[in-house]
Amino acid sequence: MKSLFRTFGLLSALFVLTACSFGGKKTAYQPLKASEVDQKSYAVAYESTAQTYQDRVNDSYDIESFINGVDEWYKGQVKLPVEQIRASLLNRMLDHDVYAYYSGVLFAADLQNNFNRLSPECWSQTHPASMTQGIYEAMQGLKAGKVRNDEYVTKGSEQWLQLCVKNVEAQGKKKK
């Protein structure tokens, strides 16, 4: 009887440890294939991130947690209200990975909100997965000290701007 309890206790402990090691782990960000990336969405997200986080990303910045926050925001998986997340970041009594995650959520939410302020049509022209990739690669570039400033990024941003401006102008004409 004693050995039965011992065996049961040992198996229970093993089960709990196994469950804890698998539960709650975030998977590493999986980039899109080159053929799946929307250039304009990637570029505008890349440039926005590079400008916003310049001089704020160092070797210890948890980019993986940050990008998980971005990715989950764009996939609609964040359940907490943005204002509650903002308040918890002000507290600053968070582990660095949690702080980075919430920072990513807020950055993605603010970027989306800024696009919607221009026009709801601007946001509808974006590809969130490509934006996530642009943000991720900008953060990696900032960490390495090598931010892209090439034709691909410049051309993509110009495409997005032209498309968004056309949509804003079209909406203005409809209202008149």
Image (tube, rainbow, N blue to C red):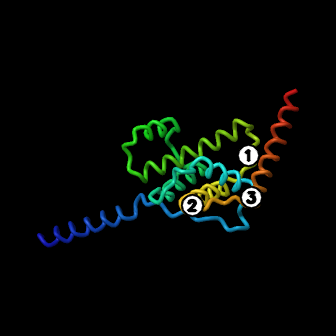
Quarter of the picture containing the C terminus is: top right
Q: Are marks 3 and 1 in contact (CB under 8 Å)?
A: no
Question: Looking at the picture, how far across and down is residue 74, in whole percent?
Answer: 61, 50
In the visual, does 14 lie left or right of 52? left
Residue 170 figure quarter = top right
- Which residue bears the numbered disc 1? 124
Q: Residue at x 83, y 35 (%)?
A: 171
Q: Residue at x 52, y 51 (%)?
A: 69
Residue occupying the far left of the picture: 2
Residue type, mark 2 in image: Gly
Q: Residues within 10 Å of mark 1 (few under 14, many from 20)?
A: few
Q: Which mark is residue 39?
A: 3
**Front position among marks 2 and 1:** 2
In the visual, does 116 lie left or right of 24? right
Residue type, mark 1 in image: Ser
Q: Residue at x 59, y 47 (%)?
A: 52
Helix, strand or loop under label 1: helix
Helix, strand or loop under label 3: helix
Quarter of the picture containing the N terminus is: bottom left
In the visual, does 166 lie left or right of 32? right
Residue type, mark 3 in image: Gln
Residue 139 figure quarter = bottom right
Question: Looking at the picture, how far across and down is residue 29, in whole percent?
Answer: 55, 62
- Residue 64 in the image: above or below residue 105: below
Helix, strand or loop under label 2: loop
Q: Which mark is residue 145?
A: 2
In three-dimensional space, the C-alpha distance between marks 3 and 1, rounded to whole angstroms, equals 15 Å
Q: Earlier in the sequence, mark 3 or mark 1?
A: 3
Q: Which mark is residue 150?
A: none
